[in-house]
Amino acid sequence: ECDGPPMFTWICHCRECQRATGGAGGVNAVFLKSAVRFTRGAPKYHDSVGSTGHKTHRGFCAECGSPLAARADLFPEIHGVSVASLDHPEQVRLDAHIWTASAQPWDYMDPALPKFPGTPSAEDLATLAAARASS
């Protein structure tokens, strides 16, 4: 369960997200950590160390293996939820593409959305959240 709308949504094109999803990347709706609750058991997490030297935690359903969530120690106050796991993924509006430096050449990226070649900064996150809040 997620309390309220996401702060922003993005597609992460890093190699870890590509591997985790078997596709172009992970599509995540990002919420404050306090707004996310798992109601049917906790995800099983796979941890890796990102290019910043901080750990990233990708959560999967322990029963079926579906991607459910992503957290990063670099931004401990936020929690990504896999858009595919939401009840109404068709209602999600994308706000950005991240880790575009790792995107596959066959991947389509909406030219109207902001693109970040790697990990967005805290200022970038604030800008994305403010842009969504004002729209």
Image (spheres, grey):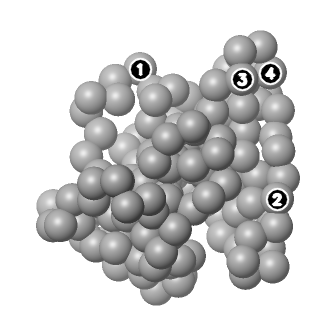
Q: Position of residue 120 (x, y in %)?
A: 50, 78
Q: Amino acid at mark 1?
A: Asp
Image quarter of the N terminus: top right
Q: Amino acid at mark 2?
A: Ser
Q: Position of residue 64 (x, y in %)?
A: 71, 15
Q: Identify the disc placed on residue 65.
A: 3
Label 3 close to label 1 by CB (< 8 Å):
no
What separation in Å lies between label 4 and label 1 (alpha carbons)? 19 Å
Label 4 close to label 1 by CB (< 8 Å):
no
Q: Position of residue 35 (x, y in %)?
A: 57, 44
| Label 3: which secondary element | loop
Q: Which residue is mark 4?
A: 62
Q: Which residue is mark 2?
A: 48
| Label 1: which secondary element | loop
Label 4 CA crowd tier, 10 Å (few <14, some 14–19, many 20+):
few
Residue 126 shows in the view: no
Q: Residue at x 34, y 73 (%)?
A: 115
What separation in Å lies between label 2 and label 1 (alpha carbons)? 28 Å
Q: Identify the disc placed on residue 69.
A: none
Nearer-N-terminus badge (3/1) = 3
Q: Nearer the viewer, mark 2 or mark 1?
A: 2
Label 4 close to label 2 by CB (< 8 Å):
no
Nearer-N-terminus badge (2/1) = 2
Front-most of residues 73 and 110: 110
Q: Identify the disc placed on residue 87.
A: 1
Left of 10 or right of it: where is 46? Answer: right
Label 3 CA crowd tier, 10 Å (few <14, some 14–19, many 20+):
few
| Label 2: which secondary element | strand
Q: Amino acid at mark 3?
A: Gly
Vertical placement of residue 58 versus 10, above or below: above
What separation in Å lies between label 3 and label 1 (alpha carbons)? 17 Å
Vertical placement of residue 113 versus 47, above or below: below
